[in-house]
Image: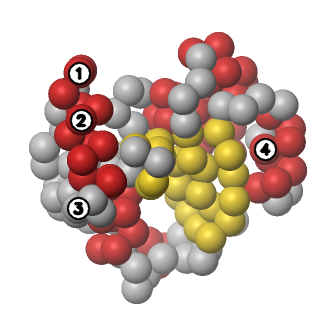
């Protein structure tokens, strides 16, 4: 199976988990890159505003051909209680060419939770089995599309 792992991460936690999963699963890793990506303190109010008001994020152009992949696993954080703006914009932009998508949403957790999640064995079963194998609340899993 030809799998693609797509990730957006502002703090780097979602990226660390996605990168580890991609390496263990032998998948291709792609990072979503917004045109404006504030760091530090200003990132939280900026992305929270975009997410809570469902504003689109402008993304840097990519040459990604999603039709070449059998499955996509998407890693993203929650901003203001909803999916972050860069990922929503990516999904909207590529909505006609998406293969089946597994969604992994990261949320507030300690750094130790993310380290444990990154070191968990890759489970090729359902996303529910994947979440159970982690035995942590580092992220929740569900399948979409």
Up-down: is 71 above or below 129? below
Give the colouring mode of the picture. secondary structure
Circle number at residue 41: 1
Q: Nearer the viewer, residue 140 or 48?
A: 48
Residue 75 at least partly seen: yes
| Residue at the image position 54 percent from the left and 70 percent from the top | 69
Local packing at callout 3 (Cα closer than 10 Å; few below 14, some 14-19, many 20+) is some
The picture places residue 10, in percent across and down from the top left corner, at 34, 33
Query: Disc 4 designates what residue?
Result: 131
| Residue at the image position 86 percent from the left and 50 percent from the top | 129
The picture places residue 19, in percent across and down from the top left corner, at 53, 35
Query: Disc 3 designates what residue?
Result: 55
Residue 30 at least partly seen: no
- Quick one: label 4 or label 1, which is nearer the N terminus? 1
- Quick one: label 2 or label 3, which is nearer the N terminus? 2
Up-down: is 109 above or below 59? above
SS for dot 4? helix
Between the residue at mark 4 and the residue at mark 1, the CA separation in whole angstroms equals 30 Å
């Amino acid at each position: 199976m030809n799998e693609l792992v797509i990730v957006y991460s502002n703090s780097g936690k979602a990226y660390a988990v996605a990168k580890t999963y991609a390496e263990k699963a032998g998948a291709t890793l792609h990072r979503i890159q917004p045109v404006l990506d504030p760091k530090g303190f200003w990132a939280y109010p900026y992305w929270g505003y975009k997410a809570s008001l469902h504003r689109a994020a402008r993304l840097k152009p990519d040459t990604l051909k999603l039709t070449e992949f059998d499955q996509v696993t998407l890693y993203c954080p929650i901003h203001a209680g909803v999916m972050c703006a860069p990922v929503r914009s990516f999904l909207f932009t590529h909505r006609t060419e998406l293969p089946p998508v597994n969604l992994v949403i990261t949320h507030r957790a300690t750094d130790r939770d993310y380290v444990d999640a990154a070191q968990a064995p890759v489970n090729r079963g359902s996303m529910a089995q994947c979440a159970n194998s982690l035995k942590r609340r580092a992220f929740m899993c569900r399948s979409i599309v």
